[in-house]
């Protein structure tokens, strides 16, 4: 995975202070905080580098208050990045919205200048652990008085690494021009440009036990160069290679990176047979032409390749395969960071009535002879709630999407109610 700094880089961490303000007494609702002293607005001197999909996908689907994105340390062939400027203080949002951001991207003494223009988007950033603090305070009837201590503006300017770049170290320079005519130069920022071959030298996984965590966090800082080593790991595992959710992850990740797909297409003839047999149908599912790769395969190998047909993860029919499709939805999210699969999982929380009926059946001692649609909905209701609960505690994007879904007029009222209690509902606690 592309390396990133601490999620809260350059952001003031107030979690420990806020935890001390948790009040659970009945009088908590009347808690009065001392009058807030003015905080001077300032621009941080260090530049932030964001993956383009964070701005184009995640930020557009989120509210104005988010968890901190990853600060990239490297860019690979075909990847696009945006540049971020951070400000703090009482008027941080106003300053960033009205400012113009100018950038210069230099590689091998060949500068590319991006003219000064307003930011693409501005987001307030939660302190590290801010979701937990807000939830803890809310349990006592107290509103978090310090939900954000910094804001980040993402540039409209976007730089994409050409596929023929040999790599190296680029220098990014940024200037912020404020509405009152002032100009601030940020510290020059270095970022590594990596070819796929150089980026693959130290992959963060060696087996399935280390591959799993990498997969789950891929969306926070995508590293397409590591998809090919990941395919090797899975293809060699007799259990993992048959799992549809992992297949969906690779399909969606390859869709999102044509450079990685083309790298794989070129390399497959020299890969071991199991890697070829596993990868070819996934490339086909992702929309890439694989016909030339099929030369030389035996009939039984062709049968295996042609037998791979992944179901639609967004098909929510309550049959026996629905739990598997829910896992596929989460794999889709892990690959892309998009809100659509999270929204689909959240929609399953509308099945609370089926869950309650299933509980009554269990209490009565009845033993159903078949998994009816109602029973499947009841079972998946708990699985969906448990996954939303667990992942939102460890994944800032999932937490942000839950906030967005709770605020969206398009979210059904019963689903909003379930999302409001996703962390406290006993049905969502793994037993």
Image (tube, rainbow, N blue to C red):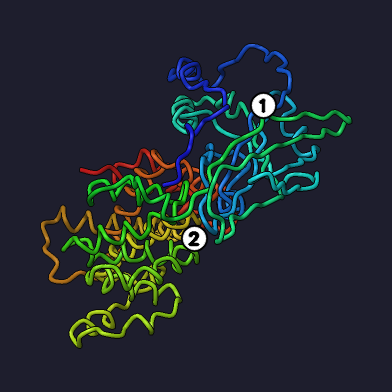
Which quadrant would residue 66 be assigned to in this image? top right
For the view shown, which residue lies furthest in the bottom direction? Answer: 299
Determine if residue 196 is in view: yes
Determine if residue 138 is in view: no
- Which element type, helix, strand or loop, lies under badge 2? helix
Looking at the picture, does residue 278 appear above or below residue 342?
below
- Residue 71 in picture, x, y percent from top left: 53, 38
How many numbered circles are shown?
2
Report the disc number at residue 249: none
What residue do we see at 60% from left, 15% from top?
A: 32
Residue at which label 2 appears: 340
Name the one closer to the observer, 107 or 141: 107
Task: For marks 2 and 1, give the one nearer the viewer.
Answer: 1
At label 1, counting other C-alpha atoms closer than 10 Å, the crowd grade (few under 14, some 14-19, many 20 or more) is: some
Report the disc number at residue 44: 1
* The C terminus lies in quadrant: top left
For the view shown, which residue lies furthest in the front direction? Answer: 108
- Which element type, helix, strand or loop, lies under badge 1? loop
- Residue 85 in picture, x, y percent from top left: 67, 35
Which quadrant would residue 264 be assigned to in this image? bottom left
- Residue 53 in picture, x, y percent from top left: 56, 54
Is 134 on the left or on the right of 119, as rendered? left
Name the one closer to the observer, 373 or 324: 324
State how far apart marks 2 and 1 are (Cα): 34 Å
Name the one closer to the observer, 342 or 358: 342
Is 56 on the left or on the right of 351, as rendered? right
- Residue 55 in picture, x, y percent from top left: 61, 50
Q: Earlier in the sequence, mark 2 or mark 1?
A: 1
């Amino acid at each position: 995975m592309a390396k990133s700094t601490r999620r809260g880089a350059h952001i003031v961490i107030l979690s420990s202070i806020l935890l001390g303000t948790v009040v659970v007494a009945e009088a908590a609702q009347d808690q009065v905080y001392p009058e807030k002293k003015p905080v001077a607005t300032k621009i941080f001197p260090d530049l932030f580098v964001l993956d383009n999909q964070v701005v184009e996908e995640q930020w557009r689907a989120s509210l104005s208050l988010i968890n901190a994105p990853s600060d990239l340390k490297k860019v690979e062939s075909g990847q696009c990045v945006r540049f971020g400027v951070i400000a703090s203080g009482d008027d941080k949002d106003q300053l960033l919205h009205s400012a113009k951001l100018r950038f210069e991207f230099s590689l091998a003494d060949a500068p590319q200048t991006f003219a000064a223009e307003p930011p693409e988007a501005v987001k307030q950033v939660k302190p590290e652990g801010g979701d937990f603090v807000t939830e803890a305070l809310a349990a006592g009837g107290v509103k978090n008085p310090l939900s954000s201590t910094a804001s980040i503006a993402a540039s409209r300017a976007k730089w994409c690494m050409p596929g023929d770049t040999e790599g190296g170290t680029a220098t990014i320079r940024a200037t912020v021009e404020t509405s009152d005519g002032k100009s601030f130069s940020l510290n020059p920022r270095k970022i590594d440009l990596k070819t796929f071959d150089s980026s693959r030298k130290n992959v963060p996984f060696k087996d399935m036990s280390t591959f799993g965590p990498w997969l789950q966090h891929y969306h926070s800082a995508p590293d397409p160069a590591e998809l090919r080593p990941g395919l090797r790991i899975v293809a060699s595992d007799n259990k993992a290679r048959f799992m549809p959710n992992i297949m969906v992850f690779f399909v969606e990740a390859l869709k999102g990176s044509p450079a990685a797909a083309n790298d794989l297409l070129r390399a497959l003839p020299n890969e071991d047979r199991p890697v070829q047999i596993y990868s070819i149908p996934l490339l086909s599912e992702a929309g890439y032409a694989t016909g030339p790769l099929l030369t030389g395969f035996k009939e039984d190998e062709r049968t295996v390749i042609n037998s791979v047909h992944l179901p639609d993860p967004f098909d929510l029919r309550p049959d026996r395969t629905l739990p598997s499709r829910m896992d596929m939805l989460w794999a889709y999210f892990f690959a892309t960071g998009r809100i659509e699969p999270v929204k689909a999982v959240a929609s399953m929380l509308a099945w609370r009535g089926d869950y309650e009926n299933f509980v009554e059946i269990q209490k009565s001692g009845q033993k159903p002879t078949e998994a009816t649609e109602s029973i499947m909905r009841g079972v998946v209701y708990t699985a969906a709630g448990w996954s939303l609960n667990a992942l939102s505690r460890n994944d800032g994007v999932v937490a942000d999407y839950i906030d967005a879904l709770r605020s969206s007029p398009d979210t059904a009222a019963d689903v909003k109610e379930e999302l409001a209690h996703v962390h406290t509902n006993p049905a969502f606690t793994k037993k």
